[in-house]
Image (cartoon, coloured by chain):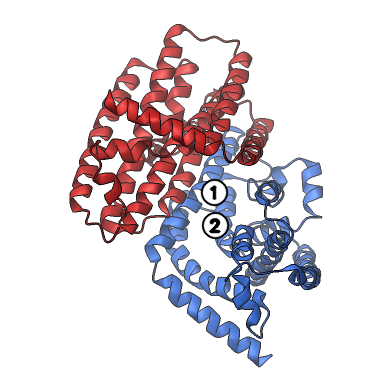
Chain colours: A blue, B red
Amino acid sequence: MKRYFDYYISMMRVSVMEQWQYPVANYFYMIGMLAEPVIYMVVWSAVANQEGGSVGGYTPGSLAAYYIVWTLVRQMNIAFTPYGWEWRIRQGRLSTSLLRPMHPLHEDVAFFAGWKVVMIILWIPLAILLSLIFKPDLHPTLLEGAVFFIAIWMAYLIRTITLSLLGMVTFWTTRVSALFELYFAAELILSGRLVPLSLMPEAVQTAAWFFPFRWAFGYPIEVLVGSMSVSDLLLGLGMQFAWVFFGSVIVSQIWKIAIGRFSAVGG
Amino acid sequence: MQGLKLAANYLRIGILNEFQYRANLYIQILQTFIALGTGLIGLNLVFNQVTELGGWTKPELLAVMGVFTITGGFIRSAIQPNMERLMEEIREGTLDYALTKPADAQLLVSVREFRLWQLVDVITGLVVLAVALTQLNWLVSIWSVLGYLSALVMGAIMVYSFWLIITSTAFWFVRVNEIANLFEGLYAAGRWPVDIYPNWLRYGLTFLVPVAFAVTIPASALTGRLSLQTWLGALALTLVLFTIARMIWLTGVKNYSGASA
């Protein structure tokens, strides 16, 4: 256990040092990313204003809160992409990682977790700026804050798991970009990224329960922005834990089968 | 004249190159449909709640989405690949090969790449636009068509100039790869007419990143909202932006010292 802990701490430290060297590059990346929620926010605020102040229970103020928290959750959602997996498998890069005594997935999880520390620090001024412009209506309780803190890291794990599963498909075939595109489209609709799920038709809201997307994105935002009952808060955390638990089991099983097929092309 | 011939030849080579990778066409079609599908879902979600948004009706916003898809396809097929290659070559010092050729270097670096399959976006955009105009009963005059076509050309020149300016900064800053990401994010704002954005954002999308000119103004022309003043303003801005881009490019080239090639 201590071995893992030490490994995570040093890997995260390396990642922080590495990413801190490129603040401008990281900022460009973040500003490009900010455009998306700002567009949604403006469009839906315009709709809410035209509807006499609220749409689907959201006022312009709470929409602003939703999409500003969105930007943080989006940062937390960044994990090693399936395209990265494709590259790693096609180029035989995996060979080096396989020689190490620790499961290669730990390296990804730790590296991106470290990067998040940098991203969150860089995110704070942008969040303040957005708050000054859009005046979010946000009054989280202490409990909601605490649940949110756990929920965003669980969200990170869930997305790491789903993206890794998707990436591992490249062990079998390297023509996968179509599959990836479909996955990201489904995620956009079912996660609460495009609009808060309560603005979606009833059927979509029900469907969202059974996919991981919502638990990795919409749920943490709603924790902080909405007024969920304590039982709903806990139910959400339970769903997150379930996804992480069963997801890890599936990942490790598939990994065992996949690794038997892996024949490095180089490295 | 010489320049046109050169561009036409590069275009031909680009098309031949793309024909080697026909499977990419199917992936492109899928990507286009997914992008269009999510766009339509967004549009429908909005119009489930309201009947018009900032003075634009649903078919009019569909027309905006058509123009957005057409222009986006053009940017990704002809402008972006050239600029990304330029960025790479400035960083690696291999721009020497382009600079030492007798043709005008700016022309050369702007026509070398062409992604044929991205034109799927242009075709799809045209279909979306046709559907939108049908819903609007084709109430378009010859003037609005001319306004639309000219606005589209001016928009393309402005986006090109914007890309060239940004890419030229690589002569000084060296690593600017993330700019493609930045542009894609900002260009996505063009999916909606810029009038719905708050003032500061609208000015930014008009004068800093010419999204308004690339999408909103051509769409305005087709839906009969384009005034002569706006058109003349667009013309003036096109000339100014193109001149600035040319100047920055020339200064950048002077500043360039091939690291190793």
Q: Is residue B219 above or below residue A202?
A: above
Quarter of the picture holding the N terminus of chain B: top left
In this rendering, the answer to whether A158 lies above or below B122 is: below
- Between B206 and B93, the residue placed more toward the observer is B93
- Which of the two residues, A161 or A134, is positioned nearer the viewer here? A161
Instruction: Mark yes or no: residue B212 visible.
Output: no
Residue that badge 2 annotates = A71
Q: Is residue B188 above or below residue A69?
A: above
**x and y percentages locating residue A167 in the rendered image:** 68, 61
Residue at image mark 1: A37
Q: Is residue A247 left or right of residue A222?
A: right
Say the numbered circle drawn on residue A94.
none
Q: What is the chain letter for disc 2?
A: A
Disc 1 crowd, CA 10 A, few/some/many (<14, 14-19, 20+) = many
Instruction: Please say if the residues under marks 2 and 1 sit with CB atoms less than 8 Å apart.
Output: yes
Residue A236 appears anywhere in the view: yes
Residue occupying the far top of the picture = B142
- What amino acid type should be assigned to the residue bearing mark 1? Pro
